[in-house]
Amino acid sequence: MSGFEAARHIRDRNLNVAKVILSTHSDEQFLKQAKEYGAQGFVDKNNAADQPVRAVNAVADGQEFFF
């Protein structure tokens, strides 16, 4: 199951879970899809190594993080 599928699964079941998607895809369409599936964060794996940690911390603090 991909991160996108997992996010959609969580959204469809109305689970109160914060979601950050880490993806190899950097196209705008994937960012939009992440938001559509209820993700609060999205990080392109090709970005700086600290981005996933920053994303998780931001989402844990109730913020969104799309990079």
Image (cartoon, rainbow, N blue to C red):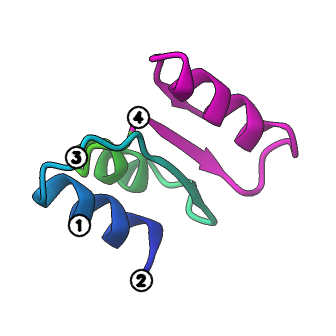
Are discs 4 and 3 less than 8 Å apart at CB?
no
Front position among marks 3 and 2: 2
Q: Which residue is mark 4?
A: 40
Are discs 2 and 1 less than 8 Å apart at CB?
yes
Q: Is residue 22 left or right of residue 49?
A: left
- The amino acid marked with disc number 2 is Met
Residue at figure coordinates x 41%, y 46% from the top left: 31
Closer to the chain start, of discs 4 and 1, is: 1
C-alpha span from label 4 to label 3: 10 Å
Q: Secondary structure at mark 1?
A: helix
Please give the range of residues in magenta: 40-67
Q: Secondary structure at mark 2?
A: loop
Are discs 2 and 4 less than 8 Å apart at CB?
no
Q: Is residue 16 left or right of residue 17?
A: left
Q: Which residue is mark 3?
A: 36
Closer to the chain start, of discs 2 and 4, is: 2
The quarter of the picture where the N terminus appears is bottom left
User: Where in the figure is residue 34, as x and y percent of width and height?
Assistant: 36, 50
Which of the two residues, 11 or 65, is positioned nearer the viewer here?
11
Q: Secondary structure at mark 4?
A: loop
Residue at figure coordinates x 63%, y 35% from the top left: 56
C-alpha span from label 2 to label 1: 10 Å
User: Where in the figure is residue 16, as x and y percent of width and height?
Assistant: 26, 41
- The amino acid marked with disc number 4 is Gln
Q: Residues within 10 Å of mark 2 (few under 14, many from 20)?
A: few
